[in-house]
Amino acid sequence: MYLRSFRFRITLLFTVIFLLCSVILYVASYIIISASIKSEEYAFLESKLLEYWAIYQTGSLDLLINEISLQRFMKEEKLYMVRIAGRYNNTLYLFVPDHWRGFNFYELENQHSIKEGEIIRLASHETAQVLDISSLYLPDQHILQIGISNTQREKTLAQFRQAFLLVIVPLLVLSFFGGMIFSSRFLWPVKSLINTTKEIIRTGRMNMRVPPRKSKDELDELIGLFNRMLEKIENLMNSLRQTLDNVSHEIRTPLTRLRGIAEMALRPPSHKKNMQKALVEGIAESEHILYLLNTLLDISQAESGIITLNKQRLDISELILDMLDFYHYLAEEKDIFLDKQLARGLFIFGDLNRIRQIISGLLENAFKYTPAKGKIEVATRTENTQAVIHIKNTGPGIKKDELTHIWKRFYRSKHAEQQQGIGLGLSLVKAVVEAHGGEISVQSKVGEYTAFQVKLPCL
């Protein structure tokens, strides 16, 4: 099970990356060390060639041979081969350390063209030893050659390889366990998310939260988003539960009345007029239930973003003016002063029927709570890139602690309980406004006024 876990895969990835980095570092170091040793050896060859060339320049071949014999007797730290050849590459003098075996130095006589500074590689037939030989022409066109073995270089590189192998194994073990610790700490928030989700599924408790780490990194942000999502789901479930309770409560009364009407109509003796009256009342109650369900469906679709909007170019002031023609008679009937201040040429992009729902919902709310001799103000204006609809009415107002609750479904303030309604009008208005990318706000002062302000994007 652990081998299939994400934790193991992260640990394995960490170890593989460490191994690759170690191999890259090893290869680079190996190349640098090998090149450095080669460079040092070639510098040694060049220095010896120049030293012997200077001796030959000031003396003779015999003097040079004596100097080589003297240095051989002194046993220098670095072992090297010396060969002096004639003009035709025939060997005149050859000095080779005693333990260098398997080299056929006569192969050097087969070199037809020898270039100064060019490295000639001569391999042993008995061992893996290789000589790197550099050449220099003496003033009389004799050839001076000095060679050095690769034994010390290969020994140093072999020691480096062994050291790497001795170090890399414990480091890989440490990197694996370090990766386990790192992945455990790294995946702790994910593990907390998994445990919280399992506990929510097991218990059904949506009030559980993942404890934040307060590290302010991406995983902490993920935990925060997850907790906010749980809070949103919990609020939605509570809202759904409350909505279902309210719907069942609201539908129970008309359904009970509808059943009572049907039972009254079925009681003998039944007259035609009683049957017709029962049908009329039954249709009215069914329409009330249908209106309630349709309104709830509209609110849900608007809030979830799946509502279909047939948007078009609308002159919002002209639309409000047309609607106010209908409400003009209602204003006269209730003795309400209707003040209109509509800006001309104020265009938005919206659904005609849905915008009518917004305006009619706010106007009906204003007429419902405006007393006789009261006043309703309807105004439109432009604010930055938004069209503003302002509807204000005098009346009882709304208490400050109730302002945040008026958008909830089925909520009705205390003074609103005396008026007819089911408490869905403002919920629908807010949902439709937000579906159009707008916003709605309210201001109120108890005993004086209530003012709603809708902002919609302008064209």
Image (spheres, rainbow, N blue to C red):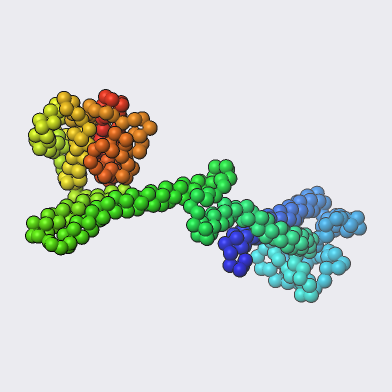
Closer to us: 393 or 184: 393
Residue in front for this viewpoint, 307 or 20? 307
Q: Position of residue 355 (x, y in %)?
A: 19, 42
Q: Relative to residue 110, is residue 249 drawn left or right?
A: left
Q: Residue at x 82, y 71 (%)?
A: 101
Is residue 30 left or right of 396 when viewed as pictured? Answer: right
Which of the 4 image quadrants contains residue 359?
Answer: top left
Q: Quadrant of the C terminus?
A: top left
What is the x, y in percent for residue 307?
26, 52
Is residue 422 visible to us here? yes
Identify which residue is drawn at 24% across, 28% down. 395
Q: What is the residue that sits farthest to the bottom in this orientation?
A: 126
Residue at 46% from the left image edge and 50% from the top image edge: 230
Q: Is residue 331 above or below residue 112?
A: above
Q: Nearer the viewer, residue 449 or 299?
A: 449
Quarter of the figure with residue 434:
top left
Residue 362 % position (x, y): 22, 37
For image coordinates 50% across by 59% down, the residue present is 201
Q: Nearer the viewer, residue 336 or 205?
A: 336
Regarding residue 46, the answer to whether it shows in the image is: no
For this orientation, the residue located farthest to the front is 269
Name the quadrant of the N terminus.
Answer: bottom right
Note whether 220 is above or below 76 in the view shown.
Answer: above
Q: How many marks?
A: 0
Say left or right for 26 vs 64.
left
Q: Residue 94: where, in percent of width, then height? A: 82, 65
